[in-house]
Image: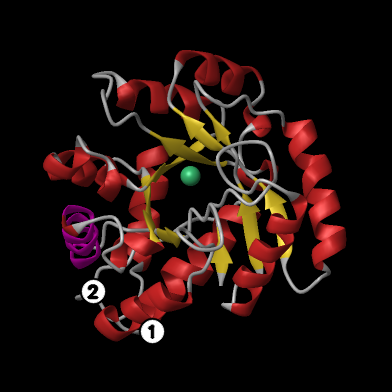
Amino acid sequence: MIDIHSHILPGVDDGSKTMEETVELLRIAQDAGTTTIVASPHSDPEYTYDPERVDELIAEAQALAGDGIKIVRGCDFHLMFANVNAAMENPKRYTINNGPYILMELSDMLIFPNTTDIWRQLENYGIRIILTHPERNLILQSKFELIEKWVNEGFYMQVTAMSLLGMFGKKALKVATRMLDKGLVHFVASDGHDAVGRPPRLDTAFEWVRQRYGGDMAELLFVDNPRAAITGAYVDSFSPDSERPRPESLWSRLFHRG
Ligand SMILES: [Fe+2]
């Protein structure tokens, strides 16, 4: 499996605190079947994101962890003015593996009315939006129609693995399940922060999805789409009523994007 969202690097945000802990988190991920993990520190009002420093820490962690798991750079990009400006100047500062995809986090307090316009602006700079854990967002939890609209408009959705296991509450589980039922999820990622409370593992959630939605769906959300996010290929959607990922959804998205 490939995990596109984690906070495993030491001292850069509220995730790992030491390089020893980082190595432990990488071991946990690897033992749970993750072969590639995106280290995506926060860039938000609280934490400053420095891609050069992140690259240094990745090199250090990679050397200690060995080659059983590969670490690539990403960023947990909070939607705020300074971030958007900096991304327009240099999109690859924030995107996953220097490709087109970005992990986009919205505030729990306020969703700007022009959010879609800002995302379209970023798309003009070659950025493709992956909205992180909408099922955990307090505003989106009661605005399901907005999640649906955004997916129809060509934006991508990442659900947190632990939401599917009920660890972020009943509401998050309910929204995530409804999203899965309607084929509105493109990725499941760990958003792992530590070894105990929020470990960077995907195995239990993979099995949860596989049992309820089948192996093809689980492969798409935990393996194929995450791989596409890293290589810059097209991400596909999957509706539980269809037997396989529908090629027309890819084409409609291509047309939609012009
Ligand atoms: Fe995160």
Q: Is residue 193 magenta?
A: no
Which SS class for mark 2? loop
**Is most of the magenta stretch helix, strand or loop?**
helix
**Does mark 2 have its CB less than 8 Å from ligand 1?**
no
Q: Is residue 179 magenta?
A: yes
Q: Amino acid at mark 1?
A: Gly
Question: Which residue is at the front of the view, 11 or 247?
Answer: 11
Point out the stretch of residues depicted in magenta. 171-182
User: Which badge, 1 or 2, comes first in the chain's sequence?
Assistant: 1
Which quadrant of the view contains residue 213?
A: bottom left
Q: What label does residue 206 carry, if any? A: none
Q: Residues within 10 Å of mark 1 (few under 14, many from 20)?
A: few
Query: Is residue 89 rendered to the left or right of residue 217?
Result: right
> In the picture shown, does residue 36 fall above or below 152?
below
Which quadrant of the view contains residue 194?
A: bottom right
- The residue sitting at 34% across, 21% down in the picture is 117
**How far apart are the alpha carbons under marks 1 and 2?**
11 Å
Query: Is residue 167 rendered to the left or right of residue 3?
Result: left
Q: Determine if residue 258 is in view.
A: no
Which quadrant of the view contains residue 55?
A: top right
- Location of residue 115 in the rendering, given as x and y in whole percent from the top left corner: 32, 24
Q: Which residue is mark 1?
A: 215
Colouring: secondary structure
Q: Which residue is mark 2?
A: 240
- The residue sitting at 58% across, 41% down in the picture is 100
Quadrant where the image shows the N terminus? bottom right
Q: Amino acid at mark 2?
A: Pro
Question: Which residue is at the front of the view, 137 or 146?
Answer: 137
Which SS class for mark 1? helix
- Location of residue 135 in the rendering, given as x and y in whole percent from the top left corner: 26, 50
- Location of residue 10 in the rendering, given as x and y in whole percent from the top left corner: 70, 45
